[in-house]
Amino acid sequence: MMDVNDLLHRQQISLLRAARAESAATRAVLEDQARAYRARVNAYRDSNRAASVH
């Protein structure tokens, strides 16, 4: 599994590429990719929050 910093970095790169995308289709794919990275970051953070509570 990637660490959270790698996920955040990849998310930002996807967002930057989406902003520069020449086609709507490419932009949509890259935005979906960024959302997927964000979901993984959130899952990582949630699991760490749950572990720190116990």
Image (tube, rainbow, N blue to C red):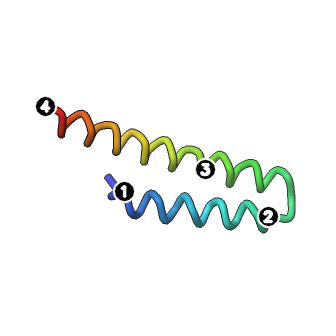
Residue holding disc 4:
54
- Residue on which disc 3 sits: 33
Q: Looking at the picture, does residue 51 appear above or below residue 11?
A: above
- Point out residue 25 in the picture as x, y percentages from the top left corner: 82, 50
Q: CA distance from mark 4 to mark 3?
A: 32 Å
Closer to the N terminus: mark 3 or mark 1?
Answer: 1
Res 21 label: 2
Q: Nearer the viewer, mark 3 or mark 1?
A: 1
The residue tagged 1 is 4
Q: Earlier in the sequence, mark 2 or mark 1?
A: 1
Q: Quadrant of residue 50?
A: top left
Q: Nearer the viewer, mark 4 or mark 3?
A: 4
Q: Residues within 10 Å of mark 1 (few under 14, many from 20)?
A: some
> Relative to 26, does residue 53 appear above or below in the rendering?
above
Cα separation between marks 2 and 1: 25 Å
Tag 2's secondary structure? loop
Q: Amino acid at mark 1?
A: Val
Q: Residue furthest front?
A: 53
SS at badge 4: loop
Closest to the observer: 49 or 30?
49
Q: Residue at x 57, y 63 (%)?
A: 12
